[in-house]
Image (cartoon, rainbow, N blue to C red):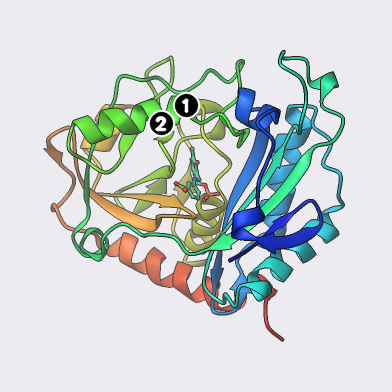
Amino acid sequence: MKVWIDGQLVDEADAKVSVFDHGLLYGDGVFEGIRMYHNRVFKLREHIERLFWSAKAILLEIPMSPEDLIRACVETCRANGLRDGYIRLLVTRGKGTLGLDPRRCPKPSVIVIASTIQLYPEQYYREGLTIVTVPTTRNLVNSVNPAIKSLNYLNNILARIEANNAGVEEAIMLNSDGFVAECTGDNVFIVQKGRLFTPPQSAGALYGITRNTVLDCARELGIVVAEPNMTRYDVYIADEMFLTGTAAEMVPVVKVDGRVIGSGKPGPVTARLLEAFHERTKTDGEVIFA
Ligand code: PXG
């Protein structure tokens, strides 16, 4: 496998960062997870835009233009012969000294890894996931805002460990007010009487690109959408529920904290949206091989 690092495509074995990189020492950096479908990098421009927003929020200057980053992603897919798969794009604060001060890091590093990704087992897409709410609270919007896709995912990892301990694959995280924020790597949606709801971004969620795509699909299908604050109660009484994320795509949820959601099977609105989503993956994004 070839990995893109700071302008060069190198062999996987030579793709290395310094132990003094503040991305490693402090989780100081930002990233994106991007998918390729049918020879296209899905929503690549939107991912690059969000990467620049994350970087801006942490005062990290990306040493490349958006257009150059787009080219680097496509080039890395080509170098690995990938038409479907997954890109992990990251920008670290770079090599510095021991000590927090990012002024000691003169040059941020840009890394593009293009590979494949393991989906949830197919069974979950057919039958739906069982999930739980976990005690670890979503980061406060006034701390490291959860909208920043930073290299410090420890909060989400703790929640994921709590999900693992409960024997399930995902976890709902609440914010400090007790409202539903999102899952550890996915945004949350519910369907109630034919209408689609997802927590507002101010509740402490990532500005999910799959979330936006699904909202666009819903509006196009004439489904009413809203972004209200949502409690666990709202989730329990939903007719349908699903999660969205680049890795997970759209995955139905059929049980939360022991409560069966709706009929206990993936619902009809979820199925319509899933079909619309898959259609979009066929036509959107930068072409890899001309
Ligand atoms: N919330 C969080 C906390 C995330 O990390 C999403 C929501 C969904 O956002 P997108 O833009 O992807 O629709 C994410 C994204 C992984 C992995 O390796 C995780 C994500 C994306 C890609 C891969 O687990 N999370």
Nearest to the observer: residue 176 or residue 2:
2
In the image, 108: left or right of 2?
right
Find residue 154 and name its label: 1
**Element class at badge 1:** helix
Nearest to the observer: residue 196 or residue 147:
147
| Residue 138 rendering spot, x and y as whole percentages | 45, 23
| Residue 261 rendering spot, x and y as whole percentages | 18, 45
Label 2 crowd bin: few (<14), some (14–19), many (20+), radius 10 Å: some
Name the residue: 65% across, 31% down. 19
Q: Image quadrant for the C terminus? A: bottom right
| Residue 266 rendering spot, x and y as whole percentages | 22, 59
Relative to 148, residue 80 above or below: below
The residue at the far front in this view is 13
Look at mark 2 in the image and give the residue it sits on: 157
Q: Find residue 136 and report its image quarter.
A: top left
Separation (CA) of disc 2 from disc 1: 5 Å
Find residue 145 and name its label: none
Q: Answer yes or no: do the residues labelled 2 and 1 have beta carbons within 8 Å?
A: yes
**Element class at badge 2:** helix
In the image, 164: left or right of 263?
right
In the image, 185: left or right of 90?
left
Name the kind of residue labelled 1 in the image. Answer: Leu
Nearest to the observer: residue 49 or residue 20:
20
Q: Image quadrant for the N terminus? A: bottom right
Name the kind of residue labelled 2 in the image. Answer: Ile
Name the residue: 64% across, 70% down. 77
Q: Find residue 270 and report its image quarter.
A: bottom left
In the image, 54: left or right of 222?
right
